[in-house]
Amino acid sequence: MKSVSISAEKRVDLGKKEAKSLRAAGKVPCVVYGGETILHFAASEVAFNNLVYTPNVYTVAIDIEGNTVNALIKDIQFHPVTDRIIHVDFIELTAGKEVNTEIPVIITGNAIGVRNGGKLRKTLRKLSVRSTPENLPDAITLDITDMKIGEKIYVRDIDSDNFDILTSGNAVVVAVKTARNAVEVEDEVESEDGSESAERLLLTLLLQNKHEKIPNHWFR
């Protein structure tokens, strides 16, 4: 998995007052869990732009005053009004030790079903996985070139030799659906056929009963 480096500083105090001061200075209070000790630090809010506002997932090399820790973002808290990042939790990575995270799904190819008028529906854009750091993939890539209308790819269809997928195997990742306009066209044809059949039946009855009085409500 690709890695991004950020520089950080140790937090001296851990109270709300210090956290508020850090945010006012454009910094984000952070915590790293999962190692021998819990690490508290702060990093520039700008440093998270390429980590948070992207569909990609990266490992993070955190340089805390000369001590580098490799980690994954576990949780992000945003301000309810401004939507600014106010806190980030990390999980420390250790070689050979499994971690849980989410990996993006990348769709490639132009499905046959889409070329024939179908509509592509992406249900899952990320999958939960468990793996050691060295086996974490950058993304899970699915080639949909051969998919026809009505076909689906389930989580259970994905090969994952070096990692475990935690998302339910029955979940649909991507599907090719019948386009709505195609359904509407079919409905219109059926409606027209039905109208023609009704008119034909009425004409037959009129001819068969030409000497009888035809009820007025037939013509309403």
Image (cartoon, rainbow, N blue to C red):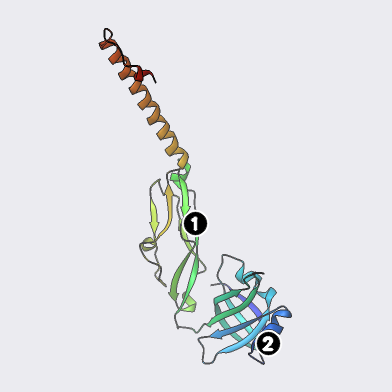
Residue 117 in view? no
| Numbered circle sitting on residue 67 | none
User: Residue 177 placed where, x, y %?
Assistant: 42, 47
- Mark 1 → mark 2, Cα distance in angstroms: 46 Å
* Residue occupied by mark 2: 17
In the rendered image, residue 88, in percent from the top left (x then y), is placed at 59, 78
Neighbor class of circle 1 (other Cα within 10 Å; few <14, some 14-19, many 20+) is: some
Numbered circles on residues, count: 2
Residue labelled with disc 1? 107
How many residues crowd around disc 2 within 10 Å: few (fewer than 14), some, or many (20 or more)? few
Q: Relative to the observer, which residue lies in front, 69 or 217?
A: 217
Task: Using the image, determine if residue 211 lies above or below residue 47.
Answer: above
> Mark 2: which secondary structure?
helix
Residue type at mark 1 is Ile
| Circle 2: residue type | Lys
**Is residue 124 left or right of 89 when viewed as pictured?**
left
- Kindly report which numbered mark, 1 or 2, lies closer to the viewer in this rendering: 2
- 53 or 116, which lies in front? 53
